[in-house]
Amino acid sequence: MSVSKPPPPHSHFAPPPNSSTSHLSIPPSSSTPSSPAPSRAASSAPRSLPPPSPVKISMQEHFAINVCPGPIMPIPQISDFFPRFHDFPMTPPPPREKKILKEPDFGLSNGGETDGENKEKERKPIEEDREERQEGADSDDDDETYLGTLEFTLLFDHENNCLHCTIHKAKGLKAMDSNGLADPYVKLHLLPGASKANKLRTKTLKNTLNPVWSETLMYHGITAIDMTTKTLRLCVCDMDRLGRNEFIGEVRVALKKLSKGESKRFKMGLERITQNKDMNKETVEQGTPVAEEERGRILVSLCYSPEKSCLLVGIVRCAHLAAMDSNGYSDPFVKIVLQPDMGKKSKYKTTVKKKTLNPEFNEEFVYEVPHDQLAKKTLEISVWDYDLGMSNDFIGGVELGINAKGVRLKHWFECLKHIGKKVEYWHTLTQQGAPPEVPPQ
């Protein structure tokens, strides 16, 4: 059985079958070599290549050429061009080591040093550089960011028992508002026992990160004992009218670092110190002097006038009084009684100072009493909180006389000894002079 190739389809470019042409057509191929005659004739005739015939393909074959896409290639990504970008976290590369170039001395300058010792010396600066880089990386935490610096001066006036705190300026404060600025002010406390009684505050400066206050604040009634036990805390805060004031940073200075009569200037970086309430309670509750100091102190002046034969008692001021009202303040006034009671002339009372824990009175009272009888007298001073329509609250008191002790006795003795001289002393308020408690019915 023979298979023959089908004739090509008709084309406009192919000549018609009956037309005469000079070109020879290719005879159809056959599987049986039945006619050897044409092959002989071809061998006898001169050999010539047939002319090229136009390629004739079907439409189906045309569309089947070069249609297969082949293997699917991956789409190139950015990571192929930038190999350092990865979809998964990678450990950072180690820091580059600094190469220290040294001139070769061929072992002449170091004498007996070996190559091992030289290598150890070269490793030391490299290791130090690594440690500095690690410390710099660790300091990028939010809690340890740069908060700014505060410049201030402290001076302790031993004669007047005053601590002068001059707040100069701050520099490079942390921005707290949305405009990239802050409204800073400085708040001062004495620790332990920080409260409204020993709080001082500077004025507020608007929209600045480098405020200049140049403001002096004073603590009255600071004794030598306070200078050894107290710590001054200076807080820089940002004032916010619509919300709560924000804390920026603080510094603390132990008052024992100061010497009498010498001012000391400080420039310290602000920090955020975590406070332990339990520790603060323990420091306040240790010993009785701290408990007495919570009631406050009073500055009293005594002077016996020989011309008028009278005792002049001056109530200058009070400091760090205890808060008796719900607003955290008191409305203090002072009562004075000279015992034994001499009638109405022996009782005096100062004016009431509203809403303060550090009142300044500067009032003087006169007791007409001979000098020889003054040694038998006792001066009772008490501080009260005024309440409208209610009974007044007792804050604290002190007694001066021959039966007193410590500073109270010393003050009374110097008044009797130095006639005509005014003597001023600070006294700590205690429970002396408190009214007796009425038992509940």
Image (cartoon, rainbow, N blue to C red):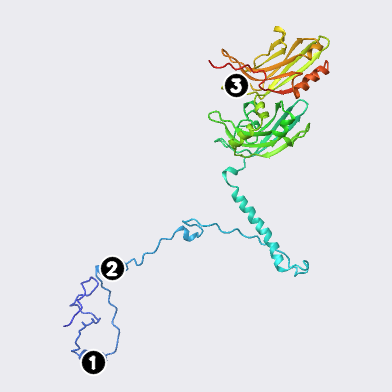
Q: Which of marks 2 and 1 is in front?
A: 2
**Measured from the top left, where is residue 233 in percent x and y?**
66, 34
Q: In this view, does 8 lie to the left or right of 140?
A: left
Amino acid type at circle 1 is: Arg
Amino acid type at circle 3 is: Met
**Measured from the top left, where is residue 75 in percent x and y?**
41, 60
Which residue is the site of mark 3? 324
Q: What is the secondary structure assignment of the residue under circle 2?
A: loop
Q: Is residue 181 left or right of residue 54?
A: right
Which residue is the site of mark 1? 40
In terms of image quadrants, where is residue 312? top right
Question: Residue at the location (74% across, 26% down)?
Answer: 161
Can you say whether 77 is above or below 44 in the image?
Answer: above
Question: Residue at the location (66% across, 56% down)?
Answer: 128
Question: Residue at the location (72% across, 11% down)?
Answer: 340
For residue 64, the mark is 2
